[in-house]
Image (spheres, grey):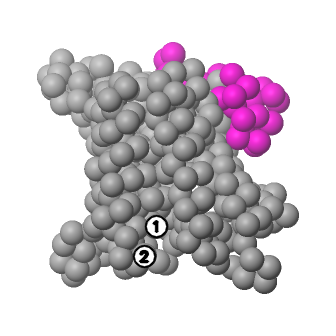
Amino acid sequence: MSSPHVLPRPAAAASEPWIDWGKAIASQLIVWHHLVSYGPLAPRLRPLLPTLFEWLGTRAALAVQLFLVTSGYLAARSLWPAPGEPRVRLAQWPARVGQRWRRLMPVYLLALALAVAGAALARQLMASPDTPEAPTLAQGVAHLLMLQDIAHVPALSTGVWYIAIDLQLFALLAALAAVLSLGLPKGRGQGGPVLAAHGVLMLCVLALAAVCVFNLHPQDAVWGIYFFGSFTLGVLAAWGRRGETRWAFTALILGIATAGLMLAWRDRLALACMVALLLLWQPARGWLARSRVQPAVAALAAWSYAVFMVHYPVSLMVNGAFERWLPHDPGNALLGLLLTWVL
């Protein structure tokens, strides 16, 4: 329910406050998107704030694009920091993907355990269609392998879909970098301009396929390729930060986004394009870094992955407690939503 690159925060991000601000703001928007979408408390308050609830229930979900673009931006640093500089060899690909999976697992497993426990408690306190049933063995295995959506298994929590998609996107970018590494001169970690051009072409062709084909079909949203266009815009922004190539990568970002938007307008793609350009140019970066609120924003960003994963079980338990023991009125509904958000 919160943000998913809510994922563990690299130290390099500390010098780029726009990443912190994006994560912090987007994570809170997504938390509230879920708070007004699930449980019995929100419907009691909706008639009093219909416009706000409508916006949070629909438009706030677009904030996930910030995480997709930022995820590509950060993944490029470790896997493919420049077009001709892939850092994954073909033989290393399984290990790199496995390393990523293990990095995600601790908080992911804790969140699943809390979700199962929270749902069990909520089922005792209230009857709500938003409360998951007790998990089956098949559900548990599918979630452990992050295949629940592909296997059409009911999700145990609202945030797990993004973590599975993030792993797929990471694996896909690592695979592209590994393929490009076959063209590296022996004993060198960086190729020349021809290899760099091949890298840009390979990435952009797949991104165009994503925004012009796969992203038009909602049934493909269980696969990383559906989101690869937004993810690629982040990779291109990271590449453009190196050297004197910002205008060239600005053109590539705009070109990919424009191609997709001309075919079918999507607010999510337009937003992803704007986020990528913001990360590429990072205006007022120094001012943001010196801002008095930057430490607080950085802290929110650092916690965004954990918040994203655990706020749903917290919401279940608070909804259940308020439903069982307090009067069913708008005032208590507001108190319950605010309490869930604070926790």
Q: Is residue 139 magenta?
A: yes
Q: Are marks 2 and 1 in contact (CB under 8 Å)?
A: yes
The quarter of the image holding the N terminus is top left
Q: Which residue is mark 1?
A: 239
Please report the bounds of the magenta region as a residue range: 125-152
Magenta span dominant secondary structure: loop
Q: Which residue is mark 2?
A: 242
Type of amino acid under label 2:
Arg
Q: Is residue 290 magenta?
A: no
Q: Give the x, y percent position of residue 272.
A: 36, 46
Type of amino acid under label 1:
Trp
Q: Quadrant of residue 39?
A: top left
Q: Residue at 30% across / 64% down in the picture?
A: 247
Q: Residue at 58% across / 26% down in the picture?
A: 220
Q: Residue at 35% across / 24% down in the picture?
A: 264
Q: Which mark is residue 177?
A: none
